[in-house]
Amino acid sequence: MEKVLVINTEDLKAITGNKTGFIEFDKEVLGLIRTKSFFVNRDNAETDETKRQIIPYCMVISGNRILAVKRKNPGELRLKGMLSIGIGGHINPGDQGTDILFNAAARELKEETDFNGNAISQIIGFLSFDDTPVSRVHFGVVYKMDVDREVKVIDKGLEGSFVTLTELSKLADSMEGWSRALTEKAVKPQPL
């Protein structure tokens, strides 16, 4: 049975309050995740709103272009055909080490793309929504990963390519909620 990293919703809300959508980076939130998170069976976590599953969500950027992917056959059917600017997934016990969040983010990137180069990564914020039963059990840790080349998607369940940050804003209507929130609040087109 798969184990996933979670945190108690009550502990998280004590710091984030009722903020939803994209939440700017906060050291206190990151510290809470690093000190108060624990593993539970994924089957239980998917419906237990007293806990939030921690999901690293990586925006892969090469210069002025960002990787946009579409899920062809996602585990979560509501995401089918939706555009995403985040590569990510659950954190498992095998990700433990010096930095469990980064280890999970890097693993997901390697599983879904041909990335094997250099990256500069930083956590830029968090994603939290309360509008659906699915969103009430997930909490995103948003990484901005600047890579030294454009990577290709190798996961058979995804298709993707790099788009300019300016083009991205025109695709908002076809994006999943987390990606739409990032596009509106955190991704700013840069001059060429």
Image (spheres, grey):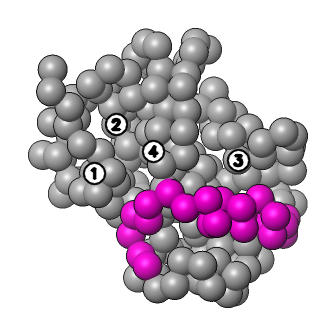
Name the foreground residue: 50 vs 82.
50
Residue 68 disc label: 2
Name the foreground residue: 42 vs 81.
42
**Above or below 161: residue 42:** below
Q: Secondary structure at mark 4?
A: loop
Q: Secondary structure at mark 3?
A: helix
Under mark 4, the amino acid is Gly
Q: Quadrant of the C terminus?
A: top left
Name the foreground residue: 112 vs 191.
191
Q: Which badge, 4 or 1, comes first in the chain's sequence?
A: 4
Residue 101 disc label: 3
Separation (CA) of disc 4 from disc 1: 11 Å
Residue segment shown in magenta: 19-41
On the image, numbered disc 1 is attached to which residue? 183
**Above or below 150: residue 130:** below
Q: Picture coordinates of residue 125 (x, y %)?
A: 48, 56
Crowdedness near tag 2: few (<14), some (14–19) or many (≥20) residues, C-alpha within 10 Å = many
Q: Is 100 left, or right, of 86 in this rendering?
A: right
Q: Picture coordinates of residue 114 (x, y %)?
A: 55, 18
On the image, numbered disc 4 is attached to which residue? 86
Label 4 close to label 1 by CB (< 8 Å)? no
Indicate whether residue 21 is drawn in magenta. Answer: yes
Crowdedness near tag 1: few (<14), some (14–19) or many (≥20) residues, C-alpha within 10 Å = many
Residue 175 in view of the camera: no
